[in-house]
Image (tube, rainbow, N blue to C red):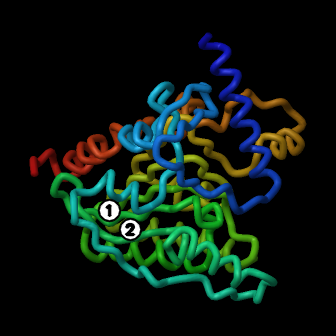
Amino acid sequence: MENAFKEKRDLIFAFKELRLQGMETEEEPIKEVPEGLFIKCKYCGESYTKDELQNNLYLCPHCSHHEPIGAYKRLEMVLDKDSFKEINKDMHSNDPLNFPGYQKKLQKQEEKCGIKEALVTGTGTIDGIKTAIGVMDSRFLMASMSAALGEKLTLLIELAEKEHLPLIIFTASGGARMQEGIFSLMQMVKTAQAIKRFSDSGGLYIAYLTHPTTGGVSASFATLGDITLAEPDALIGFAGQRVIEQTIGQKLPQGFQLAEYLQEHGFVDHIVSRKEMKKTLSLLLRLHQGGQEK
């Protein structure tokens, strides 16, 4: 039974990798499910209701598969009630290359997701400890990295440095935003430099990798944390498995880009379920403060 479930899960992740290799930057929206209607988990095949999913932090009640969640929902789960103060809320992409259809696509994403860019940033408290926090939202163009996203993130990092706050970034991205070309790729250097300055000033940066964290995001700020956490079964890597195999001419292990494999090989420090998310972050922040209680 366990082997059958693992094989089904591996097939699903292989399918997700193929989508990423196809340079898709937009995923299926998180669908609203009518009250009382049953949802079938694509991992274990069991069914549950919308209420059961919400009450279980958007984890499958049967196999604990982590369903995607929006940025504000994650902030609600992590931060103390009413403590979040958003910054640069209205910052958005300005179509630097006049890419055909890009402006309309951005407008559609804004209307669908209720945000102007694929990153929400601000400050808040976790068990009373003030923190600078950024959350990428995969509903918005697969949280691809634009010039605006890079600027928004850099300003958050600089705020954390200025106010001597710990920094937490939740990543979830398909990589660079192709509609912005080199302007998108330049954000890898920009954000990495900002993290370096923050680190040199003695700041604590906790990177929390969620599904998927790939491309230019994984090759820059996502993998520069002092502590690197990941959600279970998160896909983490730069290029897809097929692309790598064709490049090096070798067959790679199944699931080698999953969080569990990366933890075994020292790339991820700890895998943390959504149910343990706030508790774990609170503990790490208190240890950074010298073990002081709130």
Where 220 sits versus 211, above or below? Answer: below
Q: Which residue is mark 2?
A: 198
- Residue 71, by quadrant, is bottom left
Q: Is residue 150 visible?
A: no
Residue at label 1? 203
Where's the N terminus, which quadrant?
top right
Give the residue type that dot 1 points to: Gly
Horizontal and vertical percent position of residue 202: 31, 62
Q: Residue 66, how many percent across, how many down?
A: 50, 39
Q: Position of residue 277 (x, y in %)?
A: 35, 43
Q: Residue at x 64, y 21 (%)?
A: 6
The reply to whether dot 1 and dot 2 touch (C-beta < 8 Å) is yes
Q: CA distance from mark 1 to mark 2?
A: 6 Å
| Amino acid beneath label 2 | Phe
Vertically, is 268 above or below 61? below
Residue at left 76%, top 89%?
Answer: 98
Q: Which residue is located at x 36 percent, y 78 percent? A: 87
Q: Is residue 219 left or right of residue 165?
A: right
Dot 1 or dot 2, earlier in sequence: 2
Q: Is residue 203 left or right of residue 268?
A: left
Tell me the SS state at disc 1: loop
| Residue reaching furthest to the top | 1
In this view of the protein, can residue 294 be seen by the observer?
yes
